[in-house]
Amino acid sequence: MNKWLKSILIAACCVFAAILMLCSLYEREEPAKPEAAEPGPGASAAPADGSSAATPGASPAQAVDEAAALEIYKPNCMACHGDQLQGTMGPPLTAVGSSMPPDQILTQIEKGGGGMPAFKGTLTDDQIRTLTNWLAAQK
Ligand code: HEC
């Protein structure tokens, strides 16, 4: 009985996922954001057959926007980390992507510490994420 219920649930989820996929196919014309706010438990559903991200689960938007990151970096970070990430009073960040995992980079930016100010209230979450993605790619 229990198993039976489970398979019904799973089937329902599949139907739901299929509907989501169909919807995203039809909405492909719009350049808007790919992940609409769907309250599905399937989380990050499936990127349909979109020519883009074929990576399963994990981090969806790891895109590095270097131009945007630099716009944030220059006024906030450059004084201590240098115009080439070479470091001044702060450590160089040229290979920080190799020495720190992204979540640690994010925490360092949000909380600061060791002589670095916290940026949690100064920068938006989006800005911090942009910086993190960019720095994580410095290897
Ligand atoms: C007032 C100077 C100062 C500013 C401004 C500053 N930092 Fe730092 N930063 C430091 C210092 C000093 C450390 C070393 C902290 C430690 O060793 O605990 C550091 C460490 C880091 C680290 C960890 C690097 C490592 O190898 O340990 C990252 C990542 C980082 N900063 C990113 C940023 C970003 C991004 C900004 C701008 C939003 C920024 N910092 C602004 C001084 C600064």
Image: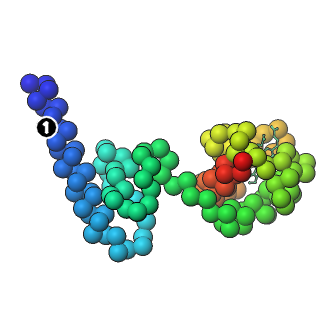
Q: Secondary structure at mark 1?
A: helix
> Looking at the picture, how far across and down is residue 113, in whole percent?
78, 39
Residue sitting nearer the eye, 49 or 107: 49
> Above or below — where is 125 with respect to 100?
below
In the displayed structure, would residue 71 be above or below residue 117? below
Residue 109 in picture, x, y percent from top left: 71, 47
How many numbered badges does the structure rendering display? 1
- Whether residue 121 is visible to the viewer of this picture, yes or no, is no
Snapshot quadrant of residue 49 = bottom left
Residue 52 image offset from top left, x and y in percent: 44, 60
Type of residue at label 1? Ile
In the displayed structure, does residue 97 sit left or right of residue 18? right
Classed neighbour count for the residue bearing mark 1: other residues with Cα under 10 Å, few (<14), some (14–19), many (≥20): few
In the image, residue 60 sits, relative to residue 68, either above or below, namely: above
Ligand 1 within 8 Å of the CB at mark 1: no
Residue at left 36%, top 46%?
A: 43
Quick check: 88 left or right of 62? right
Query: x and y percent of residue 71 in the render?
Result: 72, 67
Could you tell me which residue is drawn at 29 percent across and 66 percent down? 25
Residue under the point 42% across and 70% down: 32
Asked where in the image residue 33 lies, by quadrant, the reply is bottom left
- Scheme of colours in the image: rainbow
Quadrant including the N terminus = top left
Which residue is at 67% across, 63% downward? 66
Q: Is residue 32 left or right of residue 10?
A: right
Residue farthest to the right? 89
Task: Say whether residue 61 is visible.
Answer: yes
| Residue that mark 1 sits on | 8
| Residue that extends furthest to the left in the rendered view of this protein | 1
